[in-house]
Image (tube, rainbow, N blue to C red):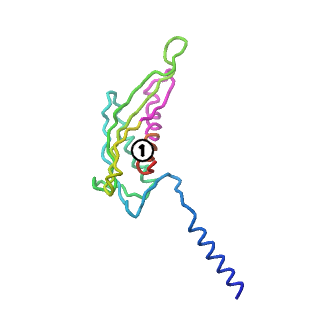
Amino acid sequence: MKRLAIILTLVVASLAWTACIPRYTLNGASIDYSVYHTISFGEFPIRAALVYPPLQSMFENRMTDMIAQQTRLRVVDNRNADLHMEGEITNYQLSPQAVGEDAYASQTRLTITVKVKYVNNKNQALSKDLSFSAYRDFSSSELLVDVQDELCNQICKDLSDLIFNATLGDW
């Protein structure tokens, strides 16, 4: 009987101990799933002076995939979802970075800027209008058309991470 009491005490103590341990998510999301169930995305049209047509769908797909993979939110087409994101791609720019001995650029930087309107339909005080930029450098000896897809994919990943952390991650 004494042995059963000791075992029972240990079980109750271990359960109490694990209940007091804080839980952290590895994706950085701080979403109260008892309040938020759905998210919707508007379009992110390209409003930059220089246009790379595949960029819009590349960015939109990256964002929706990230939300679907890293949260339990259901992506819906209803603008009145619990959360909503829309915006525009405002900058797609090439700029020289490093100048070589011959006075020509040896590195070129591709910068993409996205303006995001994040709407929290459950708590309007948490809604935000934000702007994010990310870039990648590449050798000027390479043609943009040869590296453009890979650079845009990498930049879209960086932008998605920044947007996720600033909105759903609440950093």
Q: Picture quarter containing residue 122?
A: bottom left
State the residue in front, 111 or 59: 111
Which residue in the protein does label 1 denote?
163
Q: Report x, y in % for residue 161.
A: 46, 44
Give the crowd class for mark 1: few <14, some 14-19, many >=20 residues within 10 Å.
many
Q: Report x, y in % for residue 106.
A: 51, 19
State the residue in front, 36 or 5: 5
Which residue shows up at 59% across the image and 72% down it?
Answer: 15
* Residue 130 versus residue 3 in the image, above or below: above
Secondary structure of the residue carrying tag 1 is helix
Q: Amino acid at mark 1?
A: Ile
Q: Report x, y in % for residue 64.
A: 39, 49
* Residue 82 versus residue 59 in the image, above or below: below
State the residue in front, 20 or 41: 20
Residue 143 among those drawn in magenta? yes
Quadrant of the drawing holding the N terminus: bottom right
Apparent side of residue 118 relative to residue 26 in the rendered image (left or right): left
* Residue 57 versus residue 121 in the image, above or below: above
- Which stretch is magenta? 133-157
